[in-house]
Amino acid sequence: MPRPPVLPSRRALFGLLAAAPFAARAQGLTTPPAPMPSAGRRPWAAELREVRIGLLGGENEADRIARFGAFRALLERHFDLPARIYPAGDYAGVMQAFAARQVEVATMGPLPYARIWLDTQGNIEPLVVAQDPDGGIAYRAVMYVRADSGITSLQQMRGHSLAWSDPNSTSGFLVPRSELREAGINLDSFFSRTGFAGGHEQAVVAVLNRQYDAGVTWTSGIGDESQGYTRGALRAMVEKGMLDMRALRIIWRSRPIPNGPTAVRRDLPQAFRDDMRALMLALPTAHPDIFRQIERGAAVGYVRADHAMFEPVIAMARAEAAARRSR
């Protein structure tokens, strides 16, 4: 009887994360200002009736649509082709739409990218990732509690409740779950209970409302903590007036995670994929207001992405799926 394949250990997987190029600052990856692709209708428009932009969940729908409205209008105007926003209720909605070929482009986290790549046998191509002011192209998962909770460390979370953000979130589920297990924490017995809040914002609100004792989310991990760092879910909530960081305390931080890509389907015309990458690389300088709306916080630009950046996360997703099947 053939032996089952040997899956890499969590320690080995996180060794890959630590050694990957995104774990260090992106020295030499900084992309100089790029020109916008020429405006006008393209030959590839004969194969695409419209460009559908998938928006992941994690914040309320009205805010997501407002943030991407100007980007949608730019695509429509620049390529003389209808563009439409597809706001999914959660991460899985965009993943399913990608697999069903119902969207052409989306900005997503590393885990949605990994699962789409696995589910579609590679029918997804990363175009760009955001770059932070320090040159980095990575972020971190953090665990937070209410500042008045009396909890100051991960060890003190024993017997308390934890809100995951979304089952398809890298920072709000996969990485903290894996790193805590690697640290020897039995998730079933360490926490009094765990549950899914429905998104990053929803998890923060649940903690502030005392529905859970702690939550996990994403942040750049650099900059002023009182402002929610330079980028991330906390920064977005601060900017929208939904959060005062004095109400929270960060008690745990993960290793670096690659910034999520803006990605397109690989079965679309090569010329379309090239035009979309060129437009994204030019966006920060050609349309800085639109860039800031999309990225929020203090990202300084985009750098070209490739599949190799996300191979460690794909390995983690495979290992997590295998662990679920073996239960």
Image: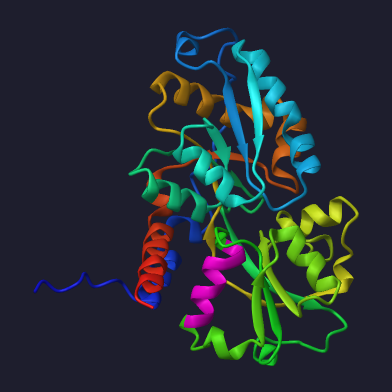
Q: Is residue 33 left or right of residue 156?
A: left
User: Image quadrant of residue 245?
Assistant: bottom right
Q: How is the image coloured?
A: rainbow
Residue 294 is situated, as x and y percent measured from the top left of the image, at 71, 39
- Is residue 122 shown above or below 160? above
**In magenta stretch: residue 318:** no
Figure quadrant of the C terminus: bottom left
Does the magenta stretch mainly form a helix, a strand or a loop?
Answer: helix
Residue 285 is situated, as x and y percent measured from the top left of the image, at 68, 29
**In magenta stretch: residue 174:** yes
Can residue 255 be seen from the camera position used here? Answer: no
Comparing 90 with 64, the one in front is 90
What residue appears at the point 60 percent right and 13 percent down from the top-left corner? 81
Residue 190 is situated, as x and y percent measured from the top left of the image, at 60, 90
- Is residue 40 shown above or below 309? above
Q: Is residue 221 left or right of residue 254?
A: right
User: Image quadrant of residue 139?
Assistant: bottom right
Read off the magenta span: 171-181
What residue appears at the point 41 percent right and 65 percent down from the top-left corner? 316
